[in-house]
Amino acid sequence: MFDVIGSLFLALLGYSPSDLEPLQLLSWQETPIFNLPVNQTDPKIQSIINKYLATLKQKNINPQAQGIWLQSDWQELASHQGTKPVSAASLTKIATTLAALGKLGADYQFVTRVYHTGQIQEGILKGDLIVAGNGDPFFVWEEAISIANTLNQLGIREITGNLIVNKKFYMNYESEPEKAVKLLYQALNVDSWTSEITKQFQSLPITTPRPQLTIAGKTSVMRGIPANTKLILIHKSLPLSEILRQMNIYSNNKMAQMLADEVGGASEVARYAIKKTGVAPAEIQLINGSGLGVENRMSPRTASKMLLAIDTLLKPFNLQVLDIFPVAGRDSIGTMENRNLPSGTTVKTGTLNQVSALAGYIALDEERRVWFTIINNGWQIRHFRKQQDQLLQQLTQHWDYSSDKFAEGSESQVYLGDPARNIIQ
């Protein structure tokens, strides 16, 4: 029927069916991208996982309390309790990372503004110095030292008044402003430097001058910016991508909570993760943004799908997941110490007294990636870590993985205490 109607329509237009070229098969339909990258039915993968679970059982560890999920970019490869939500420890930080990237953007920078009251005369600020933060979770000694040097550049050597901060000023992972302002006072008032501050100063580029600044007054916290102030300096944080990298390498709980609070809290982080991954709401239940507490629960599948969602969010910024999570063989600090993971494996660890978790991906080559999540519940943490490492080693051997195939990631051009992020007004 369709052919008859089509012929009549062509006739009205003055064409006959023979005038038309036959439709050719598009070449992209035959390209390798449509060949799924890893064989879903490979029995060897499940055999390796079964042996892993059997090894745990020999140690009287309940296999049903363990969760495993493996998938390619395209499809599920293997699962053991893969959709069951369990205590996930610091895999929660994957959810916080996802929400922060999605809501703020990888290049987002927190802004801290510096004001003063009174007048500056002959190197003396006869008034108060006011520092208004905006929730920067990575404002540490080096950042404060750079502000002190910029104040020197503005001609300020002495402050006769007080040092005042607002409630969103955080320092050295301290979110209580009454404590944060005392830390800032130590950093700006050079006479009060501790050995720890001196050590961090010595880690800065050798051309960094030692600040010359003293503060005579006290510290306090304000509710709002007074009307009689003058803005003299804007300090921009490291880009969010670098902040997240540091948070994940060291699995910093306080940074994670600050970021979760910034984007709406634990419930909003979970809601956003559900939206971006399409998993059932029951598969992720969070009480905070850090993973502290067994009440933070997610399925292994959720963790892997969140990493895939992060990968998508990073592409417009020419970044990859390995740019914001630790990589075996590249990073040997923080949570990567004493691990024997295949080189090039990008991971996020998670540990509580009775939980050991590991999620990430293995890049088999430029096109094929395997995303994995392993969540162990029990008290044998060291044994879990050893078995996780061995499981990934066995899987990479099965796939004939070579560590020289993984990308190093983009080189960071930013550093803590960089005066270029201070903008004089």
Image (spheres, grey):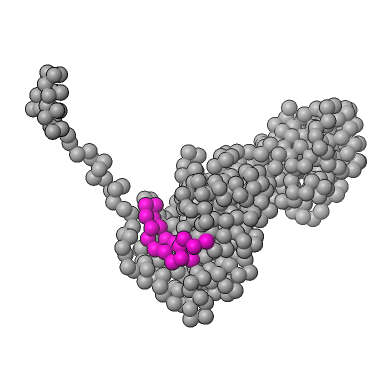
Nearest the eye: 292 or 390: 292
Q: Is residue 40 left or right of residue 272?
A: left
> Residue at (52%, 65%) from the top-left corner?
375
Nearest the eye: 162 or 293: 293
Above or below residue 165? Residue 360 is below
> Percent from the top left, x then y, of residue 53?
45, 74
> Percent from the top left, x then y, of residue 294?
62, 63
> Percent from the top left, x then y, of residue 68?
46, 65
Q: Is residue 402 left or right of residue 102?
A: left
> Percent from the top left, x then y, of residue 287?
63, 55
**Looking at the image, can residue 319 be seen?**
no
Residue 219 painted magenta: no
Q: Is residue 320 left or right of residue 122?
A: left
> Residue at (55%, 69%) from the top-left corner?
377
Q: Is residue 196 left or right of residue 358?
A: right
> Residue at (65%, 60%) from the top-left corner?
292
Q: Which residues are magenta?
A: 67-85
